[in-house]
Amino acid sequence: MKASAFAYARATSVSEALELLVVHGESAKVLSGGQSLMPAMNLRLISPEFIVDIGGLTELGGIAVERGILTIGALTRHVDLLKSTEIAAHAPLLTQAVAHIAHPAVRNRGTIGGSLAHADPASELPACMITLGAVIIARGPLGERRIAAEEFFRGIYETALLPHELLVAVELPVAPEGSTHFFHEFSRRRGDFAIVGLAAQAIVRDGQFVDLRLGFFAVGDRPLLAKSGSKLIGVPVTRTVLSEACSALSEELSPMGDQQATPAMRRYLAKILLARCVGSLLSRADLGLGGEE
Amino acid sequence: MDTVAVALHVNGDYVEANVLPRLNLADFLREHLQLTGTHVGCEHGVCGACTVRMNGEIVRSCLMLAAQAHRSSVETIEGMSDSGEIADLQAAFRDRNALQCGFCTPGMLIAAQDLLQQSPQPDREQIREHLSGNYCRCTGYQAIVDAIETIARQRAGRSP
């Protein structure tokens, strides 16, 4: 299908974009790369009356590292993240995750700000943001607001952004010294939306987790920072301990059923992912088989 | 509804137009410029039939407004075909029966050329991964991968 009719304005500055959002309020949508918005419009899932195109605002691009904080401009494209040496050095989880986002032609247009503001519960970047403890920076007519990633995602396509606010950047703490990461998702075809996915970052010392952050996606209406990861921190991880963590994880999830998978299948796959993640991060082949249950 | 003024280069030609905001780039190319080699399949970014090159990078023309192509340089299968840039790939597709109905072929060729420009000697897995966003419902993909692999080798052998 084609998108329904709308009025269009090409913003030439952030302040102009904000003025347009104030005037048009909830009937407006912000267009950056369009790789989530355009499909939704073409499928007539949404029919905004007004489109504010921020694609030309170079002030919203760029990746910078300063005092242990990685700042990524909202218009940074997936392909830019994938090729960035700063990201590879300071947020290697992101480099790995971005390779799973759709296909090359989509990664050439899609932006981090667009993906986060769209908040598809099956997409990779929102989960990475909660795993990495990101802060989302939103600018409105009265100034900027800083929102913790965990507070930002509120439901399917729902975020803490107000209709007159623009997501301008995200800030990530650089990966701590000695941290490791794990990323995997199950999908029918390379680049398709995940059936279940996991973005994890950890610090391991002497064979035990000192820190473990588990961001699951496609397991509910928003990305989930799994509390059950705490059961694995500071203890020798045995098969029993892992099995208990998997059971606790299952309690935390509220997966939906769709044409890709039933809720039961998603729970099962999430547990497999947890087991593989733990086995991989601890370099323990005996744990990562994921064949339990 | 007000129209939007766009000015861009398409296959090297300068084009100016006033378009409705909702017009996507694929329909602009097909209906305003009669460049019907760009195909419209799923219209939500899944099938890859509408792949074109914009400022040297492949994009989905169904997931872009024509208005967003303002001041850009777009190359379609017509341009890449006429310039001879992909003549060897096209010949290999024909020789290897890497197309049947041909609907996916323009997108496949443009995605394949993009891969070969970025990594001149891809293995079969890399070829499959780069083409993962392009559906073919005829060939089963093996012949397409064969054709691209052949040209990758041929080009590598020819270059100094």
Image (cartoon, coloured by chain):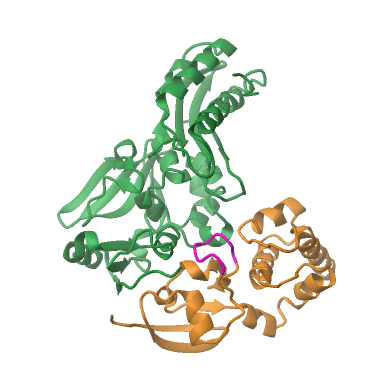
Chain colours: A green, B orange
Residue occupying the point 73% across, 51% down: B125
Q: Residue at x 78, y 70 (%)?
A: B93
Is residue A35 or residue B10 the one in the foreground?
A: A35
- In the displayed structure, A207 sits above or below B158; it is above
Residue A204 position, x and y percent, is 52, 22
Say whether residue A149 is magenta.
Answer: no
Residue B131, given in percent of the width and then of the height, sits at: 66, 59
**Where, quadrant-wise, is the C terminus of chain B in this rendering?**
bottom right
Q: Is residue A256 left or right of residue B120?
A: left
Seen at 52% across and 12% down, the residue is: A241
Q: Residue at x 64, y 61 (%)?
A: B135
Which of the 4 quarters of the picture holds residue A58? bottom left
Chief secondary structure of the magenta portion: loop
Using the rendered image of the protein, determine whether residue A74 is visible from the camera's viewpoint. Answer: yes
Residue B120 shown left or right of residue B24 in the figure: right
Where are the magenta residues, as a range? B41-48
The residue lying toward the viewer, choosing from B103 and A239, is B103
Q: Residue B56, can we see it?
A: no
